[in-house]
Amino acid sequence: MFDVFALGPTGWGDEMLMGAVMTVLVSSSSLLLGITLGIVFAACKLSNFFILRAIAEVYTTIIRGIPELLVIYLLFFGGSSAVMYLAKIFGYMGYIELNAFTIGTIAVGAISGAYSTEVIRGAVNSVPKGQFEVGKTLGLSGYSLYGKIIFPQVARIALPGIGNVWQITLKDTALISVTGLVEIMRQSRIAAGSTHEPFIFYTAAIILYLLITRLSNIFFDSAEKKYSKGYVSKEAL
Amino acid sequence: MRLELMYESFFKIVEGIPLTLQVVSISTILGIFLAVAVALMRISGNRLMSLPAYYFVYLIRGTPLLLQLYFVYYGLSQFEAIRESILWPILKEPYWCGIITLTISTGAYSSEIIRGGILSVSKNYIEASGALGLSQIKTFLLITLPITVRQALPAYGNELILMVKASSLISIVTLMEITGIARTIISKTYAPVEIFLVAGSIYLVINFIIVMFVNLAERRLGIEKAT
């Protein structure tokens, strides 16, 4: 029963593992893109300009109210022409096709970004105003204020939320399989079709996802501990 | 922007709304029963009950919904025993597989919301109710349940929106709901932006209506909005 998972050309073991690696890669790059978008749009939401706040509000509302699959279809069918349109403005007339990895990263990154925006906004809001004021009183600004004083506090509060966003992002990457990117979902579909053993391959896929979840939980727990140094945990009180 | 195409496709995509709403409402209602059962198992204090419930929630929350759908639709049908069982007329239909998967999924997610709600009920109320001579069942129905509903409603509103979004996945197993129709039109006309705007707006309207109803219910129950 387990020879279907043999490594090498006889079984699907190595292909499934490569699928898992692809899932982790596309999830991580989507999360990074998402956090970047999250920082930008959280800054928009917290800004004094009405237009910036409105843009950020529209972005998060649309992403949180529309199925992920629809966003992926939009980028899958329209991503390349959008890039070509942009390239034309800059004078490049050639044909550009985005690969499945790029499309997937942009799509899931945009989804992940909307959730990150809320997490980061909440975290920035929870940093006491005095911290900003004290920093400014000490003559700090720019990187020394935001990078050295505000960021570590935001990171500590945002980390559990980003951990949740990571979970959502990881699961959303399964949807990219419809665009042909060979990650866990797609690979188990191919293997199931070729061996006529869907049950065993979908079970294997479930185990791989749970394994990634478990390992990333361990990672986020240790990161939380690192950033919480000097704080007394609630349980200890 | 091809406005005429958007206008035409709007009427085609609208035809998918009944299926989306049908699947969402059936699985939400069935899901509530599952969620209450799982939540009660988890807080039962009996490890034989709470452990399976814990692992069930862990399994569902840790895996993508699409995978669960494939598992139910393709994975289970592999076995002769299932194909010959009385369940087969149900399990061979993508419609029922979609409903089963969505029910299980919302059951697991909502069970956590309900568990949080039940745990937030102060012990004093339960003790007071016992002192007044109310039976356990009456205490649950008259004290615990109403307070749980109040506590869980805001989070449950989010879950409802997630359900509407999740229902789009059943288009992958050939069901022609909003997303399924939208996808077909996109691949025929190659106008992804226009169709996205139409289908996306329909989803936003549905979710907006849900949010309005949840807000109305919250106000009726006197839940204060966290600001």
Image (spheres, coloured by chain):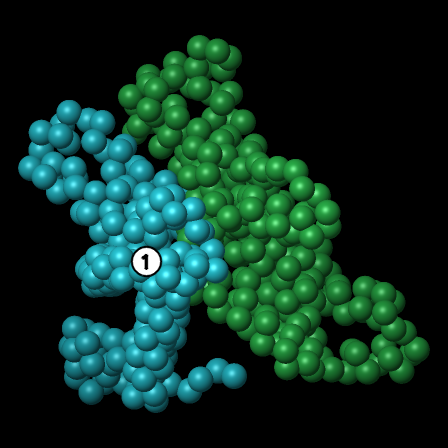
Q: State which quarter of the image contains the C terminus of chain A.
A: bottom right
Q: Which residue is pictured at 34% across the width and 20% down the height?
A: A194
A3 above or below B189? above
Q: Which residue is pictured at 26% across the width and 80% down the height?
A: B146
Question: As rendered, which of B218 and B145 lies closer to the eye?
Answer: B218
Q: State which quarter of the image contains the N terminus of chain A.
A: top left
Residue A82, percent from left and from top: 58, 50
**Residue A118 in view here:** yes
Q: What's the colour of chain B in the image?
A: cyan
Residue indicated by mark 1: B9
Q: Is residue B86 left or right of residue B37?
A: left
Q: What's the colour of chain A in the image?
A: green
The secondary element bearing badge 1 is classed as: helix
Asked which quadrant contains residue B220, the reply is bottom left
Asked which quadrant contains residue B178, the reply is bottom left
Residue A120, percent from left and from top: 63, 66
**Residue B162 in view here:** no
Q: Label 1 marks which chain's residue? A: B
Question: As rendered, which of A216 and A49 lies closer to the eye?
Answer: A49
